[in-house]
Image (spheres, rainbow, N blue to C red):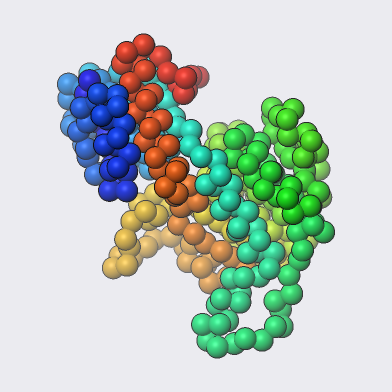
Amino acid sequence: MKVIAYAYRPDEAIAFERFSKELNLDITYVKECLSPENAHLAEGIEAVTILGNCNARRESLEKLSKCGVKYLSSRSAGYNNIDLEAAKEFGIKVSNAQYSPNSVADFATMLALMLNRRVIQSIKRSASQDYSLVGLMGNELHNQVVGVIGTGRIGQAVIKNFSGFGPKILAYDLYPNEDMKKYVEYVDLDTLLEKADIITLHAPLFESNYHLINKETIVKMKDGVKIVNTARGELIHTFDLIDGLKSGKIGGAALDVIEGEVGIYHNDCRFKTINHDEMAILRNLPNVVLTSHFAFYTDQAVSDMVECGLRSLYLFLTKGNSPWEITL
């Protein structure tokens, strides 16, 4: 059974070798992301696997369909880069991946602690040999209210992490999880925004929550609120966030993702001009932690992503369906 893997990374090699042998898959590897320009490489292959930074919009999917592609699996959890309506139109079944939720959950917890204890300010000061304490007084987590937006697998792992520190935890989700109610109080979004000292985002990106964090919702927040985003950059209106940081309404932000990151994150841009004004501003604010979309990046998660992507294609090819299939 033939499969083509776009956006193949060397760190995936061990997992690809292991699971391709286990599932008896003949894989063609393409280092570049899927795009309309290289979709033709899938000619004669029914199954494609991609990552979340690939272009799986209408034009790409149409060309894949003409090549004979019937199944597309993303090795990422997020699938906002895939035009699901076009995929359905062209008869392509789509799936996403599940991977160790602890990878992102641990990272988000770490970022929240860094904001709480002003670690990034201390690191920046130390670079110029300023070891003074003024302005570095932090907060203890057990005295705070943590708001978790999105209680899927990652959100649940985050909640369990935070519960060990003893804060009050509020949660918002369209579909509350009964098991989580022993750790959290589910509230409406406005209540969470009004009461949380730390807000951490763990929701997938949809049209309905695009720019969920914006000037209107920021006004509802506590003064000095801290915001953590390890989900999708487009959940936050970046310039509104910047305004909040500059005014002091927002006490700090830790962002592993940011709007317009595609083509920048996961690439070596040392000798390139980066045309991203918001990133340039955020990098120069003292109360901001920016990381390059690698909260997911652990050995366990990478292995899980490859396994899930390939196993999904195997099931599509042999059974016609996959437990990870995404349907409209």
Residue at the spot x=27%, y=30% of the render?
A: 20
Residue 154 position within the rendered picture, expressed as x and y whole percent measured from the top left: 59, 40
Residue 240 is left or right of residue 260, and the answer is right
Question: Nearest the camera: 251 or 139?
Answer: 139
Residue at the spot x=74%, y=40% of the render?
A: 171
Residue 193 position within the rendered picture, expressed as x and y whole percent measured from the top left: 76, 47
Question: Nearest the camera: 273 or 8?
Answer: 8
Q: Is residue 73 above or below residue 250?
A: above
| Rendering quarter of residue 311 | top left
Residue 87 is left or right of residue 175, and the answer is left
Across the whole image, how many numbered discs are drawn on residues? 0
Residue 66 position within the rendered picture, expressed as x and y whole percent measured from the top left: 22, 20
Residue 46 position within the rendered picture, expressed as x and y whole percent measured from the top left: 25, 20
Quadrant occupied by the N terminus: top left
Residue at the spot x=21%, y=23% of the render?
A: 2
Question: Nearest the camera: 304 or 235?
Answer: 304
Residue 288 is left or right of residue 4, and the answer is right
Question: Nearest the camera: 37 or 139?
Answer: 139
Residue 114 is left or right of residue 326, and the answer is right
Question: Furthest residue to the top?
Answer: 319
| Rendering quarter of residue 175 | top right
Q: Is residue 7 visible?
A: no
Q: Is residue 289 visible?
A: yes
Q: Is residue 68 above or below residue 103?
A: above
Residue at the spot x=42%, y=18% of the render?
A: 322
